[in-house]
Amino acid sequence: MIRQPIKKRTAILLGVASICLLVMVYGWLSWRQHRANPKDTTIPNLSQFVEGWKRITTTDAAGDVWILEDAAATYGRLALGLLTGVGLAVLFGMAMGCFAKAEAFCLPPLGFLAKIPPTAMLAVYFVMVGTEMKMYVAMIALGIFPTLAQAIYQAARNDVSDHALYKAYTLGASHLEVICCVVFRQILPRILESVRLQIGPAMVFLIAAEWAVADVGFGYRLRIQSRLLNMNVVYSYLIILGTTGLLMDWLLSFTRRKLCPWFGE
Amino acid sequence: MKALSVQHVSHAFGDHRVLHDVNLDVAAGQVVALVGPSGCGKSTLLRAILGTHPPNQGTILADGQPVRGPTRNVGIVYQHYSLYDFLTAQKNVAFGPMLDETSILYRTFCLLKWRAKRRRHLEEAVCLLEKVGLGEAIDQYPSQMSGGMRQRVAIAQALIMKPKVLLLDEPFGALDEATREELQRMLLDLYQENVQAKREGRQPPHTIVLVTHELNEAIYVADRVIGLSQFHSGGEQGATIVYDKAAPVFDTSQPKDLAALVQQREELRRIVFDPDRLQDRDEYVTFWKDEAGKMSEEGNHQ
Ligand SMILES: Nc1ncnc2c1ncn2[C@@H]1O[C@H](COP(=O)(O)OP(=O)(O)OP(=O)(O)O)[C@@H](O)[C@H]1O
Ligand SMILES: [Mg+2]
């Protein structure tokens, strides 16, 4: 039968098995490659990985630790960009969901902006704000803003019934209280969920921007090291990116469960 | 004191005339049931009283003040969508006092005072939940409650505001028969509080307008039944009040006396629901005339 539930232990075992399989297939590919060419760096083996890790985590000629400076640069940009983008989107989305005038005013340009690929906008940001922090923030914030604002607007518009609003007024709420204590509270889990889904795209825009113009950060390091075919460094960076992505995902789910226990899974 | 006064209210949606010259006075402490054929405009009238959808013509006074929008003077319980999903039963009930008595600034900057106030609100909420028979379910979210429980919480949520008028729009319409009867008895208990207050010379606490499509419920719960209907001479203008009479008052401690209901129910069926019988619209609007003697007596008494 389909959708037949399985035991928790079986589920865990299957999960571990799939990861083991992945590692084994990689190991076999690497072994085959190194048998043909012992100097190969495209599919690094374990000792090459160890060597790569050492290079990432110890000071280089210029006195920098790659992983530290790259992580600080990339995640600093990501945090600032996300914060700005989410802040803007909440502001505009809520305004559009609550006020017909704001809706009529903002919806057409937003729909249009959402259709321009943010990475294509890089050219514009590059010219307008240079290559400093501002550019990355603009890239991420404006990249996720249209989609996020639209999602929040939809939620504020459709997930809060008129009756819930009228009821709030009969309970003596002011307009601001209706917005903050009813509409915002009601759609908070949807906002967190939308933000969670936008972290992926935000990362794409950031790496693309760093790839093109940065002199520090994950995107920059990946570009340089892949040119040199130092795949041990590249793969290590990818693993770090994947792990932190998972972590952020989990953190936002956790926040949602804590803040909105009523929302269910 | 009139808790509610509806004066010459007419309403049309485009060419579709729904309400025509509706006049209605409700004294504080009355429990009024509003019945009428489906689509005659009962909800439209209630929305006008609530202030969310003002009528095309006429004025409505709640507690002597013209209604210009939904305010804390008029409470509402809807058939669906009656609670805030993100609050537990207790917090749903305490939500009103919080919004009514404090502002966002107060809650942010006067933390200590606000905390003391909050504690009092939550205690008050528990009292009200016990009154509607939900003492143990205070920490449940609406999604965890049955329909009957939700409506009880919704009624407690409205009662805690002590509104001048409480509007109920088919509050039990989606409930099963047994739950329905329990909630009807709960409303009767509220009526008993009115009786008690009047006896002690206090202002009766609950003034209720209940829309229902169950005639038995209307007669059982209310002390006054109003029929809104388009079936009267001049009905093409829209629906108006064609029936307004006192209803027998029941006591929850007594078994339900069905015989007493039957006569009035048949009368209502004839006057309000029968499209073939078109009488003069004021013929059965006799509440204030019937009650005139009694009312002036009460007036002297106060
Ligand atoms: N927003 C609207 N636009 C147009 N017509 C409407 C609107 N709301 C209600 N009506 C019409 O007004 C009439 C009265 O509607 P209303 O909901 O007040 O009836 P009701 O007596 O509450 O009916 P029910 O017993 O089914 O709840 C109906 O014929 C309905 O079609
Ligand atoms: Mg209705």
Image (cartoon, coloured by chain):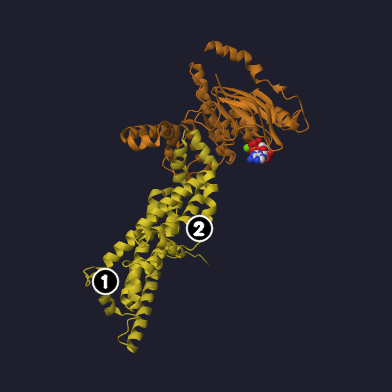
Which element type, helix, strand or loop, lies under badge 2? helix
Position above or below: B262 against B291 = below
Q: Which residue is mark 2?
A: A113
The residue at the point 62 percent across, 35 percent down is B43
Q: Amino acid at mark 1?
A: Ile
- Label 1 marks which chain's residue? A
Which of the two discs, 1 and 2, sits closer to the camera? 2
From the top left corner, tell me how far across and down residue A114 is, in percent: 50, 58
User: Which residue appears farthest toward the right when viewing the image?
Assistant: B276
- Quadrant location of ligand 2? top right
Give residue A252's quadrant in the image: bottom left
Q: Amino acid at mark 2?
A: Leu
The residue at the point 26 percent across, 65 percent down is A68
Q: Which chain is orange?
A: B
- Label 2 marks which chain's residue? A
Q: Which chain is yellow?
A: A
